[in-house]
Structures are given as C-alpha cells and as structure tokens.
Image (cartoon, rainbow, N blue to C red):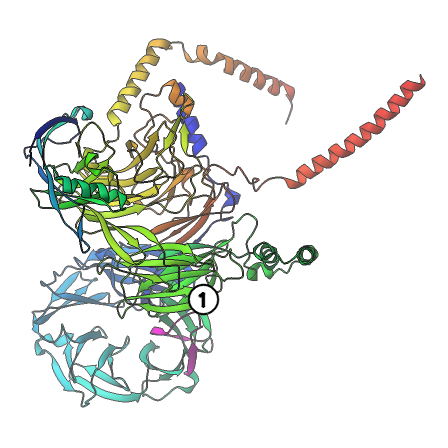
Amino acid sequence: MFELKILLFSIGCLTCSGLFEDQVGKWDWLRKHVGPVKHVNFGTIAGGNIFVGTASNVLASINSRSGKLVWRKILQEDERGVIHSLSRRGNPILVTGSDPPILRSFHISGALHWETKLPSTPPKDSEQEHFIDAESMTVVSVYTSAKDVVVSQFSYASQETKTSEPISAPFARLSKCTLVDNSIYVCLVDQTLKVLALSDLARGFISSDLKTDASALELKGLPEGRFVAVRSKVSTWLYGVSAKGAELLRQFDDLTEITNFKHNDVVYQVLAKRSESSCWTLSVLDSKFSEVSELRGEICIPNVFSGIRTLDVMGLSKKDAAVSYRAVVTTDDAGVLMFQKEGRVVWSREEALSEVTNVQFVDLPLSDIEAHIEEEFTEKPTGVLSMLIKRIYSQLQQLATFFEPKNPLAKNFGLVRDNFGFHKVVFMATKVGKLFLVDNLSGDILWSRYLPNIRPFSNGQYITVTQRSTAHIPHPPVLSIFGRSPSGGSRVLALNPITGQILDDQHLDITITQYSLLQPNEEFLKGVVLYDETTRRTIVYPAKANTNYKHYLLTVGKRGVADGFLLEDGKIDRLWSIHLAAGSEVEGVAVKGQENVHSQGRVLGDRSVLYKYINPNLAAIISRSAQQNSVFVYLIDVVTGSIIYQTVHRKAKGPIHMVHSENWFVYSYINEKMRRQEISAIDLYEGFEQPNDTFSSFSSVQPQVEHNTFILPDYIVQLKDTVTEKGITSKLILAANAQGSILEIPKAMLDPRRPVNPTMLHREEGLIPYVPEILVPPQSILNYNQSVARVRGIETAPSGLESTCLVLAYGLDLYYTRVAPSQNFDILKDNFEHYFILVVLAALVTATYVTRALSARKALKAAWQ
Amino acid sequence: MIKFIAVFGLLVSCSETQDIRPVFALFHSFELEGSEPIWMARAKVTVDALTHNPSNRTASKAMISIESNQLTPEERRKVDNLALSGKRYQLKAVDTSTGHHVIAYTYHADPLQQTLKLSLDPSGFLEGVTFLPAGREQVIVDIMQLAPQPETATYIQRMDHERREREKTQGQDNRNFFAKYWMYIVPLVIFLLISGAGNPEGQ
C-alpha cells in the first residue's frame, strides 16, 4: 500500500500540469487549415457556406462571408481518402478513393447523409474519373485503359448502375478528355475533337476537325452547360458540343482563363484577361455571347499571394434581382481567396501553412537601446571619458523611454526581445515553396514569401540553418534555407529572418544530403559544409567562410550499409564501414541536437553518483527487416564506428519514432504479436568513476546500458523532447497521437532503471516502481481539447526562463503552446495577487508605525507612574 | 609463418541457437597505395559453437578459434611507425558466408594488442568490428540480444504477492458497516441534529 501511495504521489507530482479553465488560450493558439483547395462547391444558397475538397484529403465548409472554417471532415491520409470529385452545387457529394470508389453525401451541417460504394468494378489497369450531378444524384464514372473507354452511370435514386461495353478509344489515355454537362464526353486528339454522347453510346466517338494549325492545344470542359474551350498559346476557341458533334461558337484572343456560371437557367461565360501582373479583368458574356457591361470586373491578387492557378465563379442575385457573381481563386502558393464582383477580396486563407515542412524558432533582436548598450561592450575601448559619456547618454535615453507614453501600436511593430524570452518568431518553410515568419504569441503572419524555384529535398524537407543569430548587432541575423532546385541541383537562399529581406540567392550544383555548421568567422557568420552522398562531393557555403574544419560524417544507405567519413578541409576520407543486420532497411537515424546537459550524473540512494555517458558523437540507427519481422536498434559512435549497443525486437514493425538526447534514447514501435504500441528507453552510464572532463570517442569506456520497454496504450505519430536554456529542468517526452493530442510523458516515467521490486535505496533515490503500462492522465494532454490534425512534427525551443520550453506542433494544423516540465519554479503564477500583497504590506507598515506610537505612549505613561 | 590456434570460451549472449559456423577473415592495412589501403591477411576467426540459454542471457557462450598470421619484422616496424606518423591502422573483416565486409580503424600505438569486438546480428552475420582497449581476450564476439519486453508477468506476480502479504498481515475486516465507520457517522448525525434544532421554525 505504501508503494502504491508513493507511485500515485509521484505520478501526481510529475504530471500535475493541466490547465484551469480561465487559462485556455492564454498562451496557446491553434490554427486550423484544410489544405490546398482542389474542388469548390458553392453550396445551396448564395452567401451561405461554400464547400471545398482539398489535396490534403479534407472536405471543409467555409463561411463565404468571413472565410472562417465552419466544419471539416478529415478523410484518410492515404489513397483511400483522395477526393476525386466534388459536386458543384447543393449538398457536398464527393467520390473518394479508387479501390473501390466511395460516394458520400453530406448535409450542409457536416453530418453524413449516406455513403455507398460505387458498384461498378473498374477494368484492369484503367484510370478513373468521376463526375457528379448533384441534382439528379447520378455519378458518371469513366474508366480509360490503353485501348478503350468504359462508361458507368450510377443513379442513387434507383441504386442502379449502367455500365457500357468497352468503347474503342486508343487515344483516350494519352489525350486530355473531359465530361461536360454529365452527358457528353469530349477528347482532344491532335487537332480533332472527339465527342461521345452518353445517351447514344452505340454511336461511338464523332470527330470534328478544329480547322486550326496551332499546336500544343489544351482542352478545358466548362463547368456549366455543354461547352468546351480549346486553348493554344494565343487563342481560345469556345465550342458547343452535342450528340451530333462539336460546333465552333466563338474565338477569343489573349485570354488567360475561361470559365462560366449558371444563374436562373442562363449560362454566362466568364473571360479573364491579364491586365496587370497580378490582376485579371473579367468580362461576362450572356447566352447570346454579347458582353454584359455591368458585370465587368477586375480582380487583383494581394501581393502576399502568388499567381492565380484556378478561377471558379458563382452567380447570384442582388437585392434588386440584378445578376452578380462571386469568384473563388486559388493561387500557386496554395492560397484561396474569395472576390466580389467589384474586385474586393472578401476573405483569403493561407493554406500553404497546412504543409509546413521545416520550423525554426528565431530569437528576436534586442531593442535599439539595449543594442546600444551591447555595442559599448563589443567596441574597442577608445578612452575613459568617451566611454563614460556614451554610458551616461544611453542611460539617459533609457530613462527617457521609461517615462515616454507607450504607443499601443508599438506592440505590433516593435519586434524586440522581452524579458523572459517568451516572445520569439517562428520561421516556417512549406512544401509549396512559401516561407513564413509567424509571431509565436499571436500566431499572426509577419511576412511571407513565395519562392517558385525551391522545393523540399526527396525526404520532404528543406535544410534550414541559422548562420548568424540576432545577438551580433550590427550584423544582421542570417538564416539560410537549402532546397532542391526544380532544374536540378540545389538552391540556397540566405535571408534576414526578422525582416524577410533576401541577402543571397544561389544555385549550387550538388544535391545536398547532409550539412554541418562550421566555426564562425570574424563577422560571426557560421559557414556550412554541404555534402552530397551519391557523388561524394562537398562544398562550403558561403564560399568565403572559414575553410579549416574537421568533421565526422555518418551516411546510412537504404540497404543497411553505414559508413563513417572524415571531412577535412575539403577532402573526404572513409574511416569505417559497418553492415546492419542482414536484409534490414534503415527506418531512421537520430542524432543529438545542440543542448546543454546540466547534471553529469545521478545521485543514487546510497549517495554515490552514477555518471552519465554523454557522448556527443553517438548516433542511433533503427532498421527493420520485413522478412524477419524484426526491428534492430543500434547505438553507434560516429567517430570510431564502434557499435556501442545493439538489440533486436522480434515481431515488431514501424512506424518508428525516436528521441535522442543527453545520455538516453527513447523510441516507439508497434509490437505485432501483442498488437500494441510499445515505447522503449535506453540509458547509458559510464559507471561510478568520474569521467575525464572532455569526452573522447577514442579513449572512452564501454558504457553500462540500461534498457527497458513499456506499453503505451495509444498510437504515436510523433515524438519529441523538451529543451530548456540550461538543461537543469527535467525533460518531458512529447508524444503526438493519431487523435491529435499531444501527450506529456515525463522522462522519469521512461526510466529503464525503474525497479520491479523497489528497495529502500530505490525509494531514497526517488525511482518510480516499474509498471509495464504508461498511463497518461487526461490532464497531461498538452493541448487539452484543441486537437491538432495529422501532426507531422513537433518543434521545441528554450525560452529565456529555465523552467519553460516553447512548443510548436505542425501538420494540417498549427498549435503553439509553452510547457514547464518541472513547474514554473522561476516565475510567479499568473493569478498571483500583486494588489493583495501590496495592501498587506502597506497595512503591516502602518500597523508598525501605529503600534510604535502606542508603545511609546505607554512607555511614557509607565515612566510617570 | 607460424600458425597457432587458440580456443577461448567467451561470455557472449545470443538469442537463437546457431547451426552455422561463421568464419571471418581479417585483413589489416598499414600502408596506402595512393589513397587506397593495401590489405594484408591478418587472421581468421571461426565461431565454433554458439550455445545459448534464453532464460539467462549472460550464460550464453561462444567458442571461437583464431588462426593468425605472424608479422615479419619489417611489417612490425611499419605498424609501429604508424602511430608515430599520426596515420591510422585499418582493419577489414570479411564475413565469408555473405561476402560483406566491414572496416574499422585505430590510432592506438600498439594496434595489434588491442582487443577486437566482432558484432554479429541474431543470425550470426557480421555487422561491425571495433577496437577495444587491450584485455584478457584477443577477440570478443557480441551477438545481438533480444530487447527487453514489457515485464507484465513479473509485475502481476509482484502485485499478487503484495496482495497476499497484505491479506496475511491485516486479516479480513469482518466488522459491519456501522462498526467500521461509527466515528464518522456519529458526529455527522450530531451536527445534523444541532443544525436542525437551531432553527425549528425556520419557514
């Protein structure tokens, strides 16, 4: 019973985080996103909510007046959730997946009406396209194979499917085809339009010659009516199609886009022409193809977004029954905007933030006055008198600003460091090539920049490096981002993260796979060594950086060969080579980040010290063999290539997530035999002898290894540890689960030394007795009820206070908060009663004076008697 | 060239019984030709038997035999010169069953005296070789161990044991509800009575 009490007490003590109701949203924020928009549905009524289907497999309802997210349905992330088609009007009806395709209809409130599998079985090796008609509730599925086309029509009302015989169409696979009005299937083959009427499938394709010699033609089916547009570089031809074939209606020149909308059973054609670099003029033609002058409009993309990618127009009636329209525009950088006819932006959404790949916390610069004081120390001494004058001047300035009335706007513009280091900015790079700087306290975007010629490397990430921090005034901070160049090789962009100003933009002709930071030069700029694993080439960026270096490098091939290299002043030398377990493939490599380790050892129950094995050159490699159904874990010293520890989990599989820090390594995997998530912890100790001051891989002893495994009744999608300024605060392991919660697990719970049979010594040391299951109480969910959808990464950064760590989880959503792993020991609680303590103090002081006067009087009286 | 055979019984651990007898050929290099090392045969290590005891990992043993080539005085001198000139001594181990090779290096003054650790995967294939400070054995074989599983059974045993202990020491409390909790009930009743008597005509 005593032990149980200890256990409960210790669990309670370690995880007494949680949040009071009034603290919700005080220092955390959640930004929900939907992903790059692929399909738009204009909903049931004009001015109501619109629905979008996105490339991130999300169906969402967006308020058409404010752009706010009303609801969203997050479908499966894999092939099954891909949205192939979305109805254009009415309730959102969509087709997802392809094997088999599933048809779902949602109520406008987001409730699922019904869902059904599309009953037709696709022919082998066929590509499929689905077209939904919301009014008649029918779905036309077109399966194109190398030789022919199969058309299948499903009606929800009768639950019947009509599937055609294969129709010979050897061109369909290679050419651009589309279905218009859910009744006419049109293909563009060279200079011929081939038309197939679904009402008369037996007749087959009817060809009509375009009578043009323009090449590189494109076909676009217009959303309403039986119209298709054929576009060349200069001209656009509008064709009307029917069962009889195609008929040329109009020819337009210099159009950038053509679309149409239907209003009161009239189909209006919308022609877009580029007027300025970021503006399109829209002109609207009525059913007789004469322009409606009052519907002429111009839309201009705000300069935070890049060029227009798609344009969807919805007709609506104004109060005086006149026709008007609204346009939904998506941009190349995954933005989505709603325009009014007059060209006003009703709302815009930055959906690039749903595809964040890299996150880096950046310290804010010092304020001007503080910078001035800093300068005094960095400058060379010029004489006592001038330094004294400078000192007095800056202190006078400080005094002046203290009494200056505070400008309320300065809070937004003054990007300067605060006392506790809680205010930072977050640099984010996204998959679409847009960079953002986000304020960590408010979540506001400070600047964004779209880069059309830089993309993530094949591992889905960029490399971001802080080459110079904000601490080196007057030199500007430099943050470099390395990415793949679409034209081959790599591209580097050096920028000032605070202002977004580009300092350097270069093309590098190697494909970077690894990098390492060099020592700073006299301008405090750290160079970067870049390494290409395939060609074994290395370069230094920037070229003028310090080129004297000696770096050890680990490369791990997919086939399980790990090599160690020495990079020395541009030369590459292979030092060692090891071969991971036969038939295994590497799942991941974890190295330690830059961090401070405060305590070199652990004090045991008998007051002896167990020293930690803190090897900065240690890398953890996990590989997996599907054949043997095993997961192999290695701890390898990168300098010597020695395998410090190796172990195997039988009947285990990925996904594997790992955290490597200080003297420990924690990783998670799935136990296939027991069908559960397990999390394993390895601690390394040197022993009871005090190690030498500096660690050397060549002379270090073999560490003692403590290893234990725990059950975590959850499904982990991401693991990360907290970091603090000096490394004194105990660590938390942050585990994001599939439901979008971020769990806090104290490292003490994942201690492999937790004893099964605790003795007095263990209790003295404060070890928690071993329990196979790690229970995470609900108050240890960092993001309480603010679920973060599809967490792809968690980034942590120390704040200026030792107790607190800043956390940003990113995925489809962004969630920022701060966490105090060992409680707020260096900061007052935010409900601390400042006024109360003032009143008490004042009362005490008055009481002292009053009683002094009283006692003096009493003493006087006593003296007279 | 003198050959000798040494047989060691070594403490290793292993997760599976082995039928194969892994043979590793060791080559070393203390000279470079251009940038490529010149490999020369140093020894052959045969793992004769891997006995394995799953219940007690540390009791597993491997019997190995080493066949090593003696160095000529000229080669010996070159090896000794390596450390003086700051160059590294390299060792290549080839797993004869798979043909895979692994490489290790050392800057130690007397590389030939250092203990070698051969790391093997659970099937007995060579993964890596490491130089360790000179010890009693020339070669140590480290076979990948099974990682610890969650100790559910031990934990349940412990809980059962604790429960039994508790029952033994305390005995069953067979008193009825009132007998056990009268000290809480009586003050509550008195309190209710007093507060009820305090305002009899409250309404």
Above/below status of A600 relative to A84: above
The span picked out in magenta is A296-323
| Circle count | 1
Which x, y percent locates residue A215? Answer: 20, 85
Identify the residue under disc 1. Answer: A65
| Residue at left offset 19%, top offset 26% | B57
Q: Position of residue A103 (x, y in %)?
A: 23, 59
Image coordinates of residue A73 in percent, x first then y, are 32, 55
- Image check: A384 left or right of A29? right
Q: Residue at x 20, y 52 (%)?
A: A557
Instruction: Please say if A16 is above or below A537.
Output: above
Q: Nearer the viewer, residue A197 or A593?
A: A593
Residue B170 lies, with reference to residue A718, above or below; the image says: above
The question of residue A316 being in magenta is answered with yes
- Front residue of A110 and A390: A390
**Subunit that carries the residue with mark 1:** A
Residue A401 can be seen, yes or no: yes
Where residue A686 appears, as percent x and y from the top left, is: 34, 31
For badge 1, the amino acid type reads Arg
Question: Is residue B161 rendered magenta in the image?
Answer: no
